[in-house]
Amino acid sequence: MTAGMALDFDNGGAEVPLDPALDSLPVPGREQQQLPDPETNPDGFNAITASVLGDDEDDILIEGPPDGSARLLAGFVDADSNRWTECTVRELRGRDEEQLERAFATGDMGRYIDAIVKAGVVSIGPVEDVKELTKALDTLLIGDRDLLVLQIRRMAYGDTQRLNVRCPFCETAFEVDYSYSNDVPLKQYDVDDRNQRLFDVDLPSGAVCEVRLVDGRAQKLVYTSENVKKTESELNTLLLTELLVSLDGKPVRGPGPVLDMPMRDRLHLLRFLVERQPGPQYGDVKQECADCAREFPLVMTLRDMFRGD
């Protein structure tokens, strides 16, 4: 995204802050919650599943494995400002499966995502050394980490997954074949300078801030099991404190400036972080009911992805 980038950092969906004005705002790095009842709360149903990450014309289909090669969207920018997008992923093994299960058992989704990318990514550009690769993975935007998770899944179990679904309108149960390459749209990194990682944002109050997008480091710092009992507003404060570099030319150190920021500025900044994040758009996948022909979101969670068929 994000999170999980979510970025769903992995699933494209996310919870929302407690402030009433933010009810439809995805937060990077969080798992998608159960959808509202479409009959009793159609507006809520539509709001939580609507995409806020760009127009359909920006979407492309996902390419990559099964040969192991994949291309990142924003990519990895090294210390010399070289940008690398080519990477290689491998099939997960039994020892990897055990590590993933241990990570999932902690309830820490940031750790779970991190375990997947560390286990499955072999190289990014010329970076192959394990320690250097771990550092590189932490700097990737959560949208690129989400893409790597998707490619690792395809390498492990194949591109297509059979799902048992139930229509939320007529409750008809049926099976669908979910294709990660054909069904999941991919949002491009829509930035003129692809090496750019810091952005100037004009806030509604008139203030100007410099911010970086959500990356692996922020995902692991904010969306951890230690913070599971924190409110969405508290998580937003942690996230913005991590990502905000300066405010009106003054360096931001600590949560003070974020806590003093007007709510409308926080909302604007959170929207910016979501809208600029590239990656797989799981929330855009829709399914037509085999019986009533009505369309509904086809929700895929990170856990579902690595169950196989």
Image: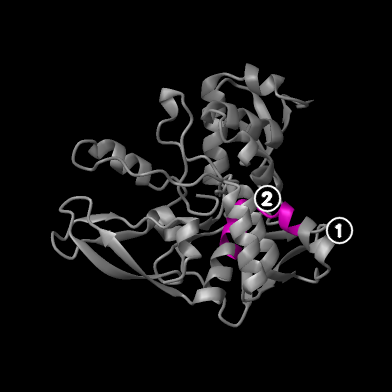
Amino acid found under the numbered disc labelled 1:
Asp
Q: Camera-side residue: 49 or 199?
A: 49
The color scheme shown is one colour
Q: Secondary structure at mark 2?
A: helix
The answer, for residue 216, to whether it is visible in the render is: yes
Residue shown at the point (59%, 59%) measured from the top left: 101
Q: Nearer the viewer, mark 2 or mark 1?
A: 2
Answer with left or right where residue 182 lies relative to residue 289.
right
Answer with left or right where residue 22 lies relative to residue 67.
left
Residue shown at the point (30%, 40%) measured from the top left: 36
Q: Secondary structure at mark 1?
A: loop
Amino acid found under the numbered disc labelled 2:
Gly
Where is residue 248 shown, x and y percent of the image?
72, 24
The answer, for residue 144, to whether it is visible in the render is: no
252 lies above or below 4: above
Q: Quadrant of residue 91?
A: bottom right
Distance in Å between CA atoms under marks 2 and 1: 20 Å
Q: Going by the picture, which residue comes out furthest to the bottom?
A: 67
Main SS, magenta region, reads helix
Q: Quadrant of residue 309?
A: bottom left
Residue that label 1 marks: 80
Answer with left or right where residue 82 lies relative to residue 284.
right
Q: Which residues are magenta?
A: 136-148
Looking at marks 2 and 1 on the same chain, the residue that comes earlier in the sequence is marked by 1
Q: Quadrant of residue 146?
A: bottom right
23 lies above or below 120: above
Residue that label 2 marks: 216
Residue 308 is inside the magenta segment: no
Q: Camera-side residue: 108 or 235?
A: 108
Q: Residues within 10 Å of mark 1 (few under 14, many from 20)?
A: few
Where is residue 70 shown, x and y percent of the image?
62, 73
Residue 146 is inside the magenta segment: yes
